[in-house]
Amino acid sequence: MSKGKGLITNFRELPYNPKLDERAREMQSNSTKGEIKFWCELLRNKKSGYQFYRQKIIHHYIVDFYCAKLKLVVEIDGTSHNGKEEYDKERESVLKSLELKVLHFNDLMVLNNFHLVEKNFKEQITIREKELQIDSL
């Protein structure tokens, strides 16, 4: 295990900033309605067929949902992203540099058109399985 710039890295894991632990717990306790719906309907108890984690710390960021096997990040974007386009662009670039695929769903879309979000999410999992040559579950 190595340390550098406040990050802990392990060859089997992604860079992790332990200074964000408390913030990640706060964010999980204060999830948006869209995040809660997405978690409950699609991810909890491996409903998607894969283990996802909530408020996962990766590098200097906290992502909404993360699946290690698929190397997949799912973000439910709400009003907190308004005016943070440059930050979000940089964040996405760092996550992609770690060979992660990032999916974005709008919070209101999750709440108001869940069937479309669910369909798209399942399609994206199938695409990701093919990209990584994973047998679908």
Image: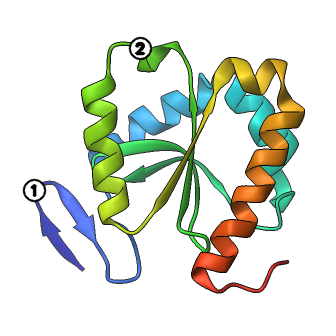
Residue 111 placement (x, y as % from top left): 79, 20
State which quadrant residue 61 falls in. Answer: top left
Q: Distance between the residues labelled 1 and 2?
A: 28 Å
Q: Which residue is drawn at 75% across and 68% down?
A: 126
- In-image side of 47 versus 17 (left or right): right
Q: Residue at x 67, y 78 (%)?
A: 130
Kind of residue at disc 2: Asn
Q: Which residue is drawn at 42% across and 42% down?
A: 62
Residue 115 placement (x, y as % from top left): 89, 35
- Secondary structure at numbered mark 2: loop
Near mark 1 (Cα within 10 A), the count class, few <14, some 14-19 or many ≥20, is few
Q: In which quarter of the image is the C terminus?
A: bottom right
- Secondary structure at numbered mark 1: loop
Q: Earlier in the sequence, mark 1 or mark 2?
A: 1
- Residue 79 numbered mark, or none: none
Between 23 and 76, the residue placed more toward the observer is 76
State which quadrant residue 49 falls in. Answer: bottom right
Kind of residue at disc 1: Lys
User: Would you say residue 4 is visible in this rendering?
Assistant: yes
Q: Which residue is drawn at 27% across and 71% down?
A: 9
Residue 133 placement (x, y as % from top left): 64, 86
Q: What residue would you read off at disc 1?
A: 5
Q: Do the residues labelled 1 and 2 touch (CB within 8 Å)?
A: no
Q: In which quarter of the image is the N terminus?
A: bottom left
Q: Which colour scheme is used?
A: rainbow
Near mark 2 (Cα within 10 A), the count class, few <14, some 14-19 or many ≥20, is few
Q: What residue would you read off at disc 2?
A: 82
